[in-house]
Image (cartoon, grey):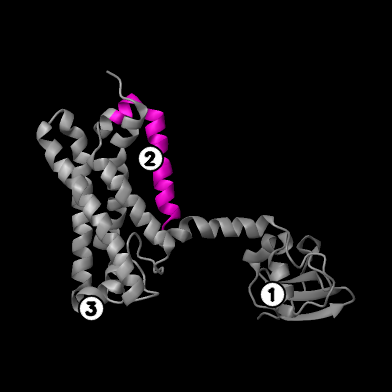
């Protein structure tokens, strides 16, 4: 008898919970940085700074063990004895998720601004996203407790929808993790900064040297020879609408850049490599 799609998606819930617990547990067990920061988090206030690292690592071991039992439960079709431990692990995951919610609430009250330390060694304050993530994890864990089919059966019956549901669930957990912003938000910001029009573009005013250098470094002319430059700015001067900036380059050359002085236009930057260096070499 085929498995209905909703039942198949519910049957895959243990995989998502296990994935979150593996990531979270690995950080707590394997990251010395995360353990060393535990004393300065709300956990240090809760259990004492001397015991914080030990408790933090112990929680990580428990998370990895729960994840292993959740995944092993998929083998209950062949080894029925694993069914009960898997249900117990799902219940333990739900209890742990509820505990995370309580811990986050305690952290906001007892140590506002402190890092959660939940899924990354990076420091990030507890925000509303942290609460939503813990609540979502609790909901998925409760689904795992009542999962009508094992996750291998779910994957076999509806592979594409189940994989898509797991991918969306994992993406949601990532987006709800302030500690993981470096993995997605910073690249998006860099991309946005590269493709959007620069706010200074087209403006006519006399740029200070620091702004000139930022414009220069954004130009194709500079990027083409940047690895060959061997000094900071040697000298600079203004000639009409241009600011001339000179660097010492390899091969006893001087890189002379002409940068627009009254507008922001990196594409207009020009370069000349002069064999007569400004800095004499022995």
Separation of residues labelled 2 and 3 (CA atoms):
37 Å
Q: Are marks 2 and 3 in contact (CB under 8 Å)?
A: no
Secondary structure under badge 1? strand
> Residue at position x 18%, y 33% from top?
75
> Residue at position x 66%, y 58% from top?
194
**In the image, which disc is placed on residue 277?**
none
Separation of residues labelled 1 and 3 (CA atoms):
53 Å
**Residue 254 image offset from top left, x and y in percent:** 73, 72
The quadrant in which residue 215 appears is bottom right
Q: Main secondary structure of the magenta part?
A: helix
**In the image, which disc is placed on residue 49?**
3
* Circle nearer the N terminus (1, 3): 3
**In the image, which disc is placed on residue 248?**
1
12 or 179, nearer to the observer: 12
Q: Which residue is mark 2?
A: 166
Task: Please tell me whether residue 63 belongs to the stretch shown in magenta.
Answer: no
The crowding category of the residue bearing disc 2, from other C-alpha atoms within 10 Å (few below 14, some 14 to 19, many at least 20), is some
Q: Are marks 1 and 2 in contact (CB under 8 Å)?
A: no
**Residue 48 image offset from top left, x and y in percent:** 21, 78
Q: Nearer the viewer, mark 1 or mark 3?
A: 3
Task: Please tell me whether residue 164 belongs to the stretch shown in magenta.
Answer: yes
> Residue at position x 77%, y 71% from top?
256
Magenta-highlighted residues: 154-177
The quadrant in which residue 90 appears is top left
**Residue 110 image offset from top left, x and y in percent:** 31, 76
């Amino acid at each position: 008898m085929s498995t209905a799609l909703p039942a198949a998606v519910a049957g895959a819930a243990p995989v998502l919970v296990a994935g979150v617990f593996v990531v979270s547990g690995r950080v707590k067990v394997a990251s010395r940085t995360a353990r060393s920061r535990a004393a300065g988090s709300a956990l240090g206030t809760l259990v004492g700074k001397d015991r914080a690292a030990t408790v933090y690592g112990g929680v990580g071991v428990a998370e990895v063990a729960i994840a292993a039992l959740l995944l092993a439960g998929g083998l209950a079709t062949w080894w029925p004895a694993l069914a009960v431990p898997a249900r117990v692990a799902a219940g333990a995951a739900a209890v742990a998720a509820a505990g995370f919610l309580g811990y986050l609430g305690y952290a906001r009250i007892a140590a506002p601004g402190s890092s959660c330390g939940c899924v990354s060694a990076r420091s990030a304050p507890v925000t509303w996203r942290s609460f939503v993530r813990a609540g979502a994890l609790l909901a998925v864990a409760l689904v795992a407790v009542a999962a009508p089919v094992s996750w291998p059966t779910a994957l076999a019956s509806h592979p594409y929808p189940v994989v898509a549901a797991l991918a969306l669930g994992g993406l949601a957990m990532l987006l709800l993790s302030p500690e993981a912003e470096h993995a997605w938000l910073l690249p998006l910001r860099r991309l946005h900064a590269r493709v959007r029009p620069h706010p200074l573009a087209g403006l006519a005013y006399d740029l200070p040297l620091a702004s000139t250098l930022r414009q220069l470094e954004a130009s194709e002319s500079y990027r083409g020879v940047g690895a060959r430059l061997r000094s900071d700015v040697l000298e600079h001067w203004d000639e009409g609408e241009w600011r001339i900036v000179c660097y010492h380059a390899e091969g006893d050359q001087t890189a002379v850049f002409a940068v627009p002085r009254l507008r922001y236009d990196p594409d207009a930057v020009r370069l000349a490599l002069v064999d007569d260096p400004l800095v004499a070499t022995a």
